[in-house]
Image (cartoon, grey):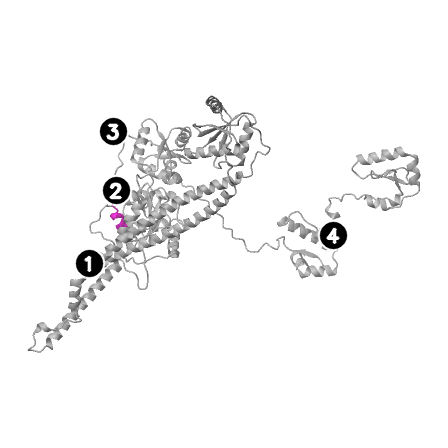
Amino acid sequence: MFTTLLKSPIPFSSSFNSTQNPSKTQKGNHSFNKNSKFSVSKTHRNGPIKMPTPPWMKGPLLLQPDEVLKPTTKRSSNNNSKAPEKALFGKESGVRGKKVMKKIIRDVEKLQGNGVLDDNQIGKFEEFEIGNWLEEIGSDGEVKKFDRKMPWVREEEKVVFRRMKKEKVLTQAEIILDNDLLERLRKKAMRMRKWVKVMKAGVTQAVVDEIRLVWRNNELVMLKFGVPLCRNMDRASEIVEMKTGGLVVWCKKDVLVVYRGQNHWLTSNGRRVFNNLASDNNTTMSQEKSNASTWGRSLNGEDRDENNQPVVGSLYERETDRLLDGLGPRFIDWWMRKPLPVDADLLPEVVPGFRPPTRLSPPKTRPKLTDEELTNLRKLAHPLPFHFALGRNRNLQGLANAILKLWEKSLIAKIAIKWGAQNTDNEQMANELKDLTGGVLLLRNKFLIIFYRGKDFLPQGVANSVMEREMALRRCQLIEEDARVKVAETFQVANEPLAKTSTVGTLAEFQDIQTKYGVLEKENNELEIQIEAQKENLERELRNQERKLAILNGKIEKSATKLAKLNSSWQTAEPDLDLETITEEERECLRKIGLKLSSCLFLGRRGVFNGVIEGVHQHWKHREVVKVITMQRAFLRVIYTAKMLVAESGGILVSVEKLKEGHAIIIYRGKNYRRPSKLMTDHLLTKREALQRSIELQRIGSLKFFAYQRRQAILDLKLKLAKLEEQGVASPQG
């Protein structure tokens, strides 16, 4: 605005008034600086007008009334005062939504009603069919409005699939107990502060006995669960209600409060007997299926079986139960979601007549798995349910027999290791199961073991068919041999004895050869194969150790080169032959003074470098004796360090003492001591170089130690290999 005002013409009277009335000018300028709004002061109605001036102008600014620019006023908020262009193309608040679109359509209707758009503009908008959405012109010229539906609203109704809320299933306590009693028990449960701890093993008999002991004096007992049951409190409440006969009235995080019941009674011994859970498996499974309603329904509501009875549980649970039925009793204390796995500890330890299954690879197929197949099988086994729960390490023939039955229907057997079981060794479990079943171990850790049945696994029906086929071939061979013998007897010459009949190429010859040499060759072949396998393993290990030794030697050479480069960059000073001498009394006095010093100089892993010598001279600036403490253990290294400090600093060695912190080196500066002009010497290493030298010394020491171990391992392997070669040479002779 100021530029516009300065460009306007200034009349002659302005200079005249500025010289006559300077006080008014200053007053006007002051008022302009104080007021932020644009203001003008009129001296006369038809005369020149005094305008506000910037601070750098010394005189007032007088303009004629027709030369003054009027300030713009704020536009009214009335919608009718909007410019048509602004109404059509202006920016609306918000970028999407029905309200914004309604405003735009309303503005377009106003523009058409006011006749703002000309013919060309109407033609352009008709190309986009805006009018078709807004109005329809009748024969009488009236505008007929469409219904108020927006263009994006379709005629058909939108189908919205809302998220189904999980139905709250009533607990046993809510079904059985009255509301007043349940409310009183829950309020009492919130104030409880003592609980019974349930460990990893779950709700054992000891926990049940402790619960009943608390129920003698109180109607409620609080249980605090550890892993893994704390991760599935619904399952924990089912187990507690089933084993104790109580009712869970309150649950929060990992805590359950159990009510003993209104009809609670105690025997003479003060306890109830529930030891038939493991033996009566059918009763337990029916009880579990009755409690499974709390775990949800199937996808299509309540399904019904053949007897028109409602089926409890999801399709996933029912299929897994069908897969595991007949393999053994279920594990009642299962901490994860249903279905319950088979309790492998309740299976028999020894199965009479058990033997590993018959295995036969398909033609042109190797039984070994590739890396890709192994990865795919692990991914496949991840979402599968657990089939067995195992807690013992040995005598697993019953489990192996159940796994073989499972492999008839499933490729993979998934075994969970019980939490809280004492002295479990998953490696021993896996090795024994692998020997008994011959399967492929996919994964093993302290929580689970996964076995694959293998490519060469034959189900029992297929194995029986193979055995029957082999027996049939054997019978055919015997029939052919009998027919050949009969034909030979028919065409035999009468005078030729029967004993001279040739058996070349017959089955009898093959059987004789197998009888005479088969067993011997089999034994020799097995021994040779074992020796060759051991040789191959030893040679492979020998090559591996030699490769590692070569790598270590290369690292040692590289580290030795760096260390030699650092050692060449510094050199020790020669000891001064003309040293001062001190008496024994002075030495003893200086030793006591040095030991009593609280301030000392520590030597770390860097050793002696130029900063250490500077620190020694800084100590000698205030006192005659300096105490240097080093952490070196070897006394010879301590003496070498003391001599080096004396040679570099020019002092007198008083004594070397053994302290709890390390070895103390006490050095006297001498009577003729003069402070050098340059404290840091140039012929020693810097602090950074000393650290690098220490690191390289440590590295080369450890590398040499490991190289020594590799050499010893190589020598042992060579001795074992020589013994095997001698054994292989001697075995054919034997």
Query: How many C-alpha atoms fall within 10 Å of the one at disc 2: few (<14), some, or many (≥20)?
Result: few
Above or below, 62 against 148 in this view is: above
Of badges 2 and 1, nearer the viewer stands 1
Q: Is residue 284 left or right of residue 559?
A: left
Q: Is residue 56 left or right of residue 310?
A: right
**Distance of label 4 from label 3 (alpha carbons):** 98 Å
- Among the 4 quarters of the image, the one containing residue 112: bottom right
Residue under label 1:
733
- The residue sitting at 30% across, 32% down in the picture is 209
Q: Position of residue 30 (x, y in %)?
A: 83, 34
Query: Of callouts 2 and 3, which one flags the residue occurring earlier in the amino acid sequence?
Result: 3
Of badges 2 and 4, nearer the viewer stands 2
Residue under label 4:
84
Instruction: Give the residue type that dot 2 points to.
Output: Asp
Residue under label 2:
280
Magenta residues, start to end: 395-405
Query: Can residue 136 be seen at all in this image of the molecule?
Result: yes
